[in-house]
Amino acid sequence: MAIIEKIIDIIKLEVDDEHKDVEITADTDLKDDLYFNSLNIVVVINEIEEEYDIQFDYNEIQNVRTVKEIVNMINKLL
């Protein structure tokens, strides 16, 4: 499974029921399109860190908004 597909699957687990119909793509903005708050983002980041056995720099992750940005950060750490 490609990284982006796995990230999208992880994100889908955290999406509220009222936003389940939003198509998640590389350009999906977690805050604007999925209405994620900081807790949602922390949960997703923790799941990704566990899945890939990596550790994000939390100063960098604070500015991440899109799926593509998350994938780019993962690729830097792998």
Image (spheres, rainbow, N blue to C red):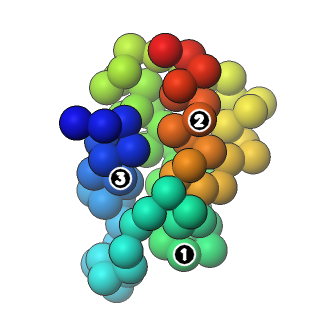
Say which quarter of the image contains residue 12.
bottom left
Q: Residue furthest left?
A: 1
On the image, the x and y values in percent for residue 7 come to: 37, 44
Image quarter hosting the N terminus:
top left
Residue 53 in the image, given as x and y percentages of width and height: 38, 15
Residue at the farthest front position: 2
Q: Is residue 30 visible?
A: no
Give whichever of 54, 38 is nearer the camera: 54
Estimate how packed mark 2 is, as few (under 14), some (14 to 19) or many (20 or more) residues with alpha carbons within 10 Å.
few
Q: What numbered label is drawn on residue 72? A: 2
Of labels 2 and 1, earlier in sequence is 1
Residue 73 image position (x, y, % from top left): 60, 31
Rendered view: 17 above or below 38:
below
Residue beneath the point at 52% across and 52% down: 67
Q: Which residue does the image show at 30% across and 77% down from the upper left? A: 20
- Mark identifier at residue 33: 1
What amino acid is found at the position of numbered circle 2 in the picture?
A: Asn
Q: Which kind of residue does numbered mark 3 sit on?
A: Ile
Residue labelled with disc 3: 8
Residue for point 50% across, 57% down: 26
CB atoms of marks 2 and 3 within 8 Å: no
Task: Decide which of tag 3 and tag 1 comes sooner along the chain.
Answer: 3
> Which element is circle 1 on?
loop
In the image, residue 24 above or below residue 11: below
**Crowding at label 3, few (<14), some or many (≥20) Cα neighbours within 10 Å?**
some
Q: CA distance from mark 2 to mark 3?
A: 14 Å
Q: Kindly identify the residue that appears in the image at 49 percent across and 72 percent down.
A: 34
Question: Up-down: is 27 above or below 48?
Answer: below
* Separation (CA) of disc 3 from disc 1: 13 Å
Sequence order check: which comes first, mark 2 or mark 3?
Answer: 3
Q: Disc 2 or disc 3, which is closer to the eye?
A: 2
Q: In 3D space, how far apart are the residues under numbered discs 2 and 1 (Cα atoms)?
A: 19 Å
